[in-house]
Amino acid sequence: MDKNKKEFVDSTLKKTPSKKKSKKSKIKKVILAIVILVIFILSSVIGYFYFTLSNVNTVELDKSNKGLAISPDVVKKLEEIKDPPVTIALFGVDRRTEKEVGNSDTILIATIDKEHKKIKLTSIMRDSRVAIPGHGLNKINSAYLYGGPQLAVKTLNQNFGLAIKDYVTVDFYSMDKIITQLGGVKIDVKQNEIQFINDYQTDTASHQKVKPVQVTKPGLQTLNGLQAVGYSRIRYIGNDQQRTERQRTVLTALLNKVMSGGVASFPSTAGKLTQFVETSLSTTDIVSLGLSALNSGTKNIVQARFPLDSYLTTPTIDGVSYVVYDLATAKQQLFDYIYKDITPQEKK
Protein backbone atom coordinates (compact mmCIF):
# COMPACT_ATOMS: atom_id res chain seq x y z
CA MET A 1 0.00 0.00 0.00
CA ASP A 2 1.42 3.34 -1.01
CA LYS A 3 1.90 6.11 1.47
CA ASN A 4 -1.12 8.22 0.35
CA LYS A 5 -3.56 5.31 0.60
CA LYS A 6 -2.27 4.39 4.06
CA GLU A 7 -2.72 7.95 5.29
CA PHE A 8 -6.29 8.02 3.90
CA VAL A 9 -7.23 4.73 5.63
CA ASP A 10 -5.66 5.84 8.91
CA SER A 11 -7.54 9.14 8.90
CA THR A 12 -10.86 7.39 8.10
CA LEU A 13 -10.41 4.91 10.98
CA LYS A 14 -9.63 7.74 13.36
CA LYS A 15 -12.74 9.74 12.38
CA THR A 16 -15.30 6.85 12.60
CA PRO A 17 -15.22 6.33 16.39
CA SER A 18 -15.39 10.08 16.86
CA LYS A 19 -18.71 10.25 14.96
CA LYS A 20 -20.15 7.34 16.99
CA LYS A 21 -19.06 8.99 20.19
CA SER A 22 -20.73 12.25 19.13
CA LYS A 23 -24.00 10.41 18.34
CA LYS A 24 -24.03 8.69 21.74
CA SER A 25 -23.35 11.97 23.45
CA LYS A 26 -26.35 13.60 21.72
CA ILE A 27 -28.64 10.68 22.71
CA LYS A 28 -27.50 10.95 26.32
CA LYS A 29 -28.24 14.68 26.32
CA VAL A 30 -31.73 14.11 24.91
CA ILE A 31 -32.48 11.40 27.52
CA LEU A 32 -31.15 13.65 30.29
CA ALA A 33 -33.33 16.52 29.07
CA ILE A 34 -36.41 14.25 29.05
CA VAL A 35 -35.67 12.97 32.57
CA ILE A 36 -35.22 16.53 33.86
CA LEU A 37 -38.51 17.56 32.21
CA VAL A 38 -40.38 14.60 33.73
CA ILE A 39 -38.93 15.35 37.18
CA PHE A 40 -39.92 18.99 36.81
CA ILE A 41 -43.49 18.10 35.82
CA LEU A 42 -43.86 15.57 38.66
CA SER A 43 -42.42 18.04 41.16
CA SER A 44 -44.85 20.70 39.99
CA VAL A 45 -47.82 18.35 40.27
CA ILE A 46 -46.80 17.09 43.71
CA GLY A 47 -46.03 20.63 44.84
CA TYR A 48 -49.45 21.83 43.67
CA PHE A 49 -51.10 18.84 45.35
CA TYR A 50 -49.48 19.57 48.71
CA PHE A 51 -50.19 23.28 48.33
CA THR A 52 -53.92 22.67 47.82
CA LEU A 53 -53.98 20.30 50.80
CA SER A 54 -52.26 22.87 53.02
CA ASN A 55 -55.66 24.51 53.63
CA VAL A 56 -56.97 21.55 55.61
CA ASN A 57 -57.72 22.29 59.27
CA THR A 58 -55.52 19.75 61.04
CA VAL A 59 -56.06 19.09 64.75
CA GLU A 60 -53.61 16.92 66.65
CA LEU A 61 -54.87 14.12 68.89
CA ASP A 62 -53.14 12.25 71.67
CA LYS A 63 -52.81 9.05 69.66
CA SER A 64 -51.34 6.95 72.44
CA ASN A 65 -53.28 3.79 73.33
CA LYS A 66 -54.12 5.32 76.70
CA GLY A 67 -55.18 8.65 75.19
CA LEU A 68 -57.63 6.90 72.84
CA ALA A 69 -58.61 4.00 75.13
CA ILE A 70 -57.23 1.29 72.85
CA SER A 71 -57.05 -1.77 75.07
CA PRO A 72 -54.13 -4.26 75.17
CA ASP A 73 -56.60 -6.98 74.17
CA VAL A 74 -57.50 -5.12 70.96
CA VAL A 75 -53.83 -4.49 70.19
CA LYS A 76 -53.13 -8.21 70.56
CA LYS A 77 -56.06 -9.15 68.28
CA LEU A 78 -54.86 -6.76 65.58
CA GLU A 79 -51.35 -8.18 65.72
CA GLU A 80 -52.83 -11.51 64.65
CA ILE A 81 -54.33 -9.94 61.51
CA LYS A 82 -51.86 -9.85 58.60
CA ASP A 83 -53.00 -6.54 57.08
CA PRO A 84 -55.51 -4.90 59.45
CA PRO A 85 -57.91 -2.40 57.84
CA VAL A 86 -57.51 1.34 58.41
CA THR A 87 -60.34 2.89 60.46
CA ILE A 88 -61.29 6.57 60.62
CA ALA A 89 -64.11 8.12 62.66
CA LEU A 90 -66.39 10.46 60.69
CA PHE A 91 -68.41 13.00 62.65
CA GLY A 92 -71.21 15.17 61.31
CA VAL A 93 -71.59 17.97 63.86
CA ASP A 94 -74.81 19.86 64.48
CA ARG A 95 -73.55 23.42 64.82
CA ARG A 96 -74.62 26.76 63.44
CA THR A 97 -71.36 28.71 63.89
CA GLU A 98 -67.64 27.87 63.77
CA LYS A 99 -67.28 28.66 67.49
CA GLU A 100 -69.85 26.05 68.54
CA VAL A 101 -68.73 22.50 69.29
CA GLY A 102 -72.08 20.75 68.95
CA ASN A 103 -73.20 17.15 69.24
CA SER A 104 -72.02 14.63 66.67
CA ASP A 105 -75.42 13.76 65.26
CA THR A 106 -73.75 11.67 62.57
CA ILE A 107 -71.26 9.05 63.76
CA LEU A 108 -69.69 6.80 61.14
CA ILE A 109 -66.64 4.58 61.01
CA ALA A 110 -64.96 4.52 57.59
CA THR A 111 -62.89 1.40 56.97
CA ILE A 112 -60.42 0.86 54.14
CA ASP A 113 -60.17 -2.93 53.91
CA LYS A 114 -57.54 -3.74 51.29
CA GLU A 115 -57.60 -7.47 51.96
CA HIS A 116 -61.29 -7.80 51.07
CA LYS A 117 -61.19 -4.86 48.62
CA LYS A 118 -63.95 -2.94 50.38
CA ILE A 119 -64.65 0.46 51.81
CA LYS A 120 -67.09 0.06 54.71
CA LEU A 121 -69.28 2.81 56.10
CA THR A 122 -70.60 1.83 59.51
CA SER A 123 -73.10 3.95 61.44
CA ILE A 124 -73.30 4.06 65.22
CA MET A 125 -76.72 5.27 66.35
CA ARG A 126 -76.36 8.69 67.94
CA ASP A 127 -78.78 7.91 70.82
CA SER A 128 -76.81 4.84 71.93
CA ARG A 129 -76.53 4.85 75.74
CA VAL A 130 -72.88 4.30 76.53
CA ALA A 131 -70.27 5.18 79.14
CA ILE A 132 -68.55 8.44 78.21
CA PRO A 133 -65.21 8.72 80.07
CA GLY A 134 -65.61 11.27 82.86
CA HIS A 135 -69.33 11.84 82.13
CA GLY A 136 -71.10 8.60 83.04
CA LEU A 137 -73.85 6.99 80.99
CA ASN A 138 -75.14 9.25 78.25
CA LYS A 139 -75.97 9.44 74.55
CA ILE A 140 -72.86 8.75 72.51
CA ASN A 141 -73.36 11.90 70.43
CA SER A 142 -72.72 13.98 73.58
CA ALA A 143 -69.08 12.84 73.75
CA TYR A 144 -68.12 15.31 71.00
CA LEU A 145 -69.85 18.16 72.85
CA TYR A 146 -68.11 17.28 76.14
CA GLY A 147 -64.59 16.76 74.85
CA GLY A 148 -64.36 17.28 71.10
CA PRO A 149 -62.89 14.66 68.75
CA GLN A 150 -60.43 13.31 71.36
CA LEU A 151 -63.23 12.22 73.70
CA ALA A 152 -65.51 11.17 70.84
CA VAL A 153 -62.91 8.77 69.38
CA LYS A 154 -61.96 7.55 72.86
CA THR A 155 -65.61 6.78 73.61
CA LEU A 156 -65.96 4.73 70.41
CA ASN A 157 -62.81 2.72 71.17
CA GLN A 158 -63.66 2.12 74.81
CA ASN A 159 -67.24 0.96 74.26
CA PHE A 160 -66.80 -1.01 71.03
CA GLY A 161 -63.29 -2.44 71.38
CA LEU A 162 -61.82 -0.63 68.38
CA ALA A 163 -58.46 0.95 67.53
CA ILE A 164 -59.47 4.17 65.77
CA LYS A 165 -56.72 6.80 65.78
CA ASP A 166 -57.96 9.43 63.33
CA TYR A 167 -61.10 11.39 62.58
CA VAL A 168 -62.71 13.74 60.06
CA THR A 169 -65.40 16.26 61.06
CA VAL A 170 -67.82 18.24 58.91
CA ASP A 171 -70.85 20.37 59.75
CA PHE A 172 -73.95 21.20 57.70
CA TYR A 173 -72.27 24.07 55.90
CA SER A 174 -69.03 22.34 55.00
CA MET A 175 -70.96 19.29 53.80
CA ASP A 176 -72.99 21.56 51.54
CA LYS A 177 -69.78 22.99 50.05
CA ILE A 178 -68.21 19.55 49.55
CA ILE A 179 -71.24 18.22 47.67
CA THR A 180 -71.47 21.42 45.62
CA GLN A 181 -67.79 21.13 44.62
CA LEU A 182 -68.49 17.64 43.29
CA GLY A 183 -71.50 18.79 41.27
CA GLY A 184 -74.16 17.24 43.51
CA VAL A 185 -75.09 13.62 44.24
CA LYS A 186 -77.74 11.32 42.75
CA ILE A 187 -80.40 10.34 45.29
CA ASP A 188 -83.69 8.48 44.85
CA VAL A 189 -86.10 10.84 46.63
CA LYS A 190 -89.40 9.51 47.97
CA GLN A 191 -92.59 11.57 47.74
CA ASN A 192 -92.95 11.89 51.52
CA GLU A 193 -89.35 13.15 51.85
CA ILE A 194 -89.73 16.22 49.61
CA GLN A 195 -91.27 18.56 52.18
CA PHE A 196 -88.69 17.70 54.83
CA ILE A 197 -85.78 18.15 52.41
CA ASN A 198 -87.07 21.62 51.55
CA ASP A 199 -87.67 22.54 55.22
CA TYR A 200 -84.19 21.50 56.31
CA GLN A 201 -82.39 23.08 53.37
CA THR A 202 -84.29 26.32 53.95
CA ASP A 203 -83.03 26.31 57.55
CA THR A 204 -79.41 25.80 56.45
CA ALA A 205 -79.75 28.36 53.66
CA SER A 206 -81.08 31.04 56.04
CA HIS A 207 -77.84 30.91 58.06
CA GLN A 208 -75.80 31.23 54.86
CA LYS A 209 -78.03 33.95 53.47
CA VAL A 210 -78.59 32.11 50.19
CA LYS A 211 -81.75 31.14 48.36
CA PRO A 212 -82.45 27.38 48.23
CA VAL A 213 -83.68 25.59 45.12
CA GLN A 214 -86.79 23.63 46.04
CA VAL A 215 -87.12 19.92 45.31
CA THR A 216 -90.40 19.51 43.44
CA LYS A 217 -90.66 15.86 42.41
CA PRO A 218 -89.78 12.37 43.63
CA GLY A 219 -87.46 9.90 41.90
CA LEU A 220 -83.76 9.54 41.10
CA GLN A 221 -82.28 13.00 40.68
CA THR A 222 -79.14 15.05 41.33
CA LEU A 223 -79.41 16.95 44.61
CA ASN A 224 -77.22 19.98 45.15
CA GLY A 225 -75.32 20.56 48.40
CA LEU A 226 -78.15 22.18 50.37
CA GLN A 227 -80.69 19.63 49.17
CA ALA A 228 -78.48 16.64 49.99
CA VAL A 229 -77.77 17.98 53.49
CA GLY A 230 -81.52 18.47 53.96
CA TYR A 231 -82.10 14.87 52.84
CA SER A 232 -79.53 13.49 55.29
CA ARG A 233 -81.09 15.43 58.20
CA ILE A 234 -84.59 13.98 57.84
CA ARG A 235 -85.63 12.43 61.15
CA TYR A 236 -89.43 12.48 61.09
CA ILE A 237 -89.95 9.79 58.46
CA GLY A 238 -89.39 6.28 59.72
CA ASN A 239 -86.98 5.88 62.65
CA ASP A 240 -83.43 6.86 63.45
CA GLN A 241 -82.18 3.72 61.71
CA GLN A 242 -83.53 5.09 58.43
CA ARG A 243 -81.93 8.45 59.14
CA THR A 244 -78.51 6.84 59.44
CA GLU A 245 -79.23 5.01 56.18
CA ARG A 246 -79.85 8.33 54.40
CA GLN A 247 -76.55 9.65 55.74
CA ARG A 248 -74.68 6.61 54.44
CA THR A 249 -76.48 6.92 51.09
CA VAL A 250 -75.21 10.49 50.65
CA LEU A 251 -71.67 9.57 51.74
CA THR A 252 -71.61 6.53 49.45
CA ALA A 253 -72.67 8.71 46.51
CA LEU A 254 -69.86 11.15 47.36
CA LEU A 255 -67.21 8.43 47.60
CA ASN A 256 -68.34 6.89 44.33
CA LYS A 257 -67.92 10.26 42.63
CA VAL A 258 -64.42 10.74 44.03
CA MET A 259 -63.35 7.20 43.13
CA SER A 260 -64.82 7.33 39.63
CA GLY A 261 -62.28 10.02 38.76
CA GLY A 262 -59.42 7.62 39.42
CA VAL A 263 -55.85 8.33 40.50
CA ALA A 264 -55.28 11.07 37.89
CA SER A 265 -57.98 13.38 39.26
CA PHE A 266 -57.46 12.55 42.94
CA PRO A 267 -54.98 15.40 43.68
CA SER A 268 -57.32 18.02 42.26
CA THR A 269 -60.40 16.55 43.97
CA ALA A 270 -58.68 16.16 47.33
CA GLY A 271 -57.41 19.72 47.15
CA LYS A 272 -60.94 21.03 46.59
CA LEU A 273 -62.57 19.03 49.38
CA THR A 274 -60.11 18.98 52.26
CA GLN A 275 -60.38 22.73 52.83
CA PHE A 276 -63.88 22.13 54.19
CA VAL A 277 -63.01 19.52 56.83
CA GLU A 278 -61.34 19.31 60.21
CA THR A 279 -59.15 16.25 60.69
CA SER A 280 -56.28 14.64 62.60
CA LEU A 281 -54.90 13.26 59.32
CA SER A 282 -51.75 14.90 58.01
CA THR A 283 -51.30 15.87 54.36
CA THR A 284 -49.11 12.80 53.91
CA ASP A 285 -51.80 10.60 55.50
CA ILE A 286 -54.47 11.96 53.16
CA VAL A 287 -52.30 11.33 50.10
CA SER A 288 -51.30 7.85 51.25
CA LEU A 289 -54.80 6.70 52.20
CA GLY A 290 -56.44 8.15 49.10
CA LEU A 291 -53.99 6.60 46.66
CA SER A 292 -53.97 3.34 48.64
CA ALA A 293 -57.75 3.04 48.32
CA LEU A 294 -57.71 3.92 44.62
CA ASN A 295 -54.82 1.58 43.78
CA SER A 296 -56.05 -1.38 45.82
CA GLY A 297 -58.79 -2.26 43.36
CA THR A 298 -61.36 -1.28 45.98
CA LYS A 299 -64.57 -0.58 44.12
CA ASN A 300 -67.06 -2.06 46.57
CA ILE A 301 -68.53 0.41 49.08
CA VAL A 302 -70.68 -1.40 51.64
CA GLN A 303 -72.83 -0.12 54.49
CA ALA A 304 -73.81 -1.32 57.94
CA ARG A 305 -75.39 0.05 61.10
CA PHE A 306 -74.96 -0.95 64.72
CA PRO A 307 -76.78 -2.17 66.66
CA LEU A 308 -79.00 -4.33 64.47
CA ASP A 309 -82.77 -3.87 64.93
CA SER A 310 -83.34 -7.17 66.75
CA TYR A 311 -80.73 -6.30 69.38
CA LEU A 312 -81.97 -2.87 70.49
CA THR A 313 -84.67 -1.29 72.60
CA THR A 314 -85.64 2.39 72.87
CA PRO A 315 -86.54 3.09 76.50
CA THR A 316 -87.14 6.50 78.06
CA ILE A 317 -84.89 6.99 81.09
CA ASP A 318 -85.37 10.05 83.30
CA GLY A 319 -87.40 11.64 80.53
CA VAL A 320 -84.75 11.03 77.85
CA SER A 321 -85.14 8.58 74.96
CA TYR A 322 -82.16 6.26 74.40
CA VAL A 323 -81.13 3.36 72.19
CA VAL A 324 -80.09 0.54 74.51
CA TYR A 325 -78.48 -2.79 73.65
CA ASP A 326 -76.01 -5.40 74.86
CA LEU A 327 -72.69 -3.63 74.32
CA ALA A 328 -70.69 -6.86 74.66
CA THR A 329 -72.56 -8.38 71.70
CA ALA A 330 -72.33 -5.18 69.64
CA LYS A 331 -68.62 -4.98 70.46
CA GLN A 332 -67.94 -8.47 69.11
CA GLN A 333 -70.13 -7.99 66.03
CA LEU A 334 -68.53 -4.64 65.17
CA PHE A 335 -64.97 -5.95 65.56
CA ASP A 336 -65.74 -8.99 63.40
CA TYR A 337 -67.36 -6.84 60.73
CA ILE A 338 -64.68 -4.15 60.53
CA TYR A 339 -61.56 -6.23 60.98
CA LYS A 340 -62.59 -9.69 59.75
CA ASP A 341 -65.34 -8.87 57.22
CA ILE A 342 -67.92 -11.04 59.01
CA THR A 343 -71.39 -9.56 58.49
CA PRO A 344 -73.65 -9.86 61.57
CA GLN A 345 -77.12 -11.33 61.31
CA GLU A 346 -80.41 -10.34 62.92
CA LYS A 347 -81.81 -12.56 65.65
CA LYS A 348 -84.19 -15.23 64.37
Image (tube, grey):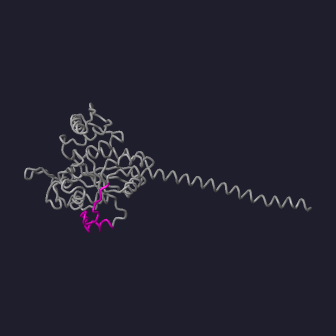
Identify which residue, 243 or 268, lies in the foreground: 268
Instruction: Write the residue at 22% across / 62% down.
Output: 158
Return the x and y of residue 250 as percentages of the image width and height. 30, 44
Q: Is residue 25 magenta?
A: no
123 vs 285, left or right, is left
Q: From the viewer's perspective, is 132 left or right of 115?
A: left
Q: Which of these two is toward me, 115 or 104? A: 104
Question: Residue 314 placed where, x, y %?
Answer: 13, 50
The stretch of residues the image draws in magenta is 58-79
Most foreground residue, 71 or 323 = 71
Above or below, 2 against 214 in this view is: below
Figure label count:
0
| Figure quadrant of the N terminus | bottom right
Residue at the location (22% across, 44% down)? Answer: 96
Up-down relation of residue 211 to residue 279 (above or below)? above
- Image coords of residue 53 (percent x, y): 38, 51
Q: Residue furthest left?
A: 318
Residue 330 placement (x, y as % from top left): 21, 58
Q: Residue furthest front?
A: 99
- Front residue of 260 and 169: 169
Residue 218's quadrant in the figure?
top left
Q: Residue furthest top?
A: 216
159 over 93 or under it: above or below: below
Q: Residue 212's quadrant in the figure?
A: top left
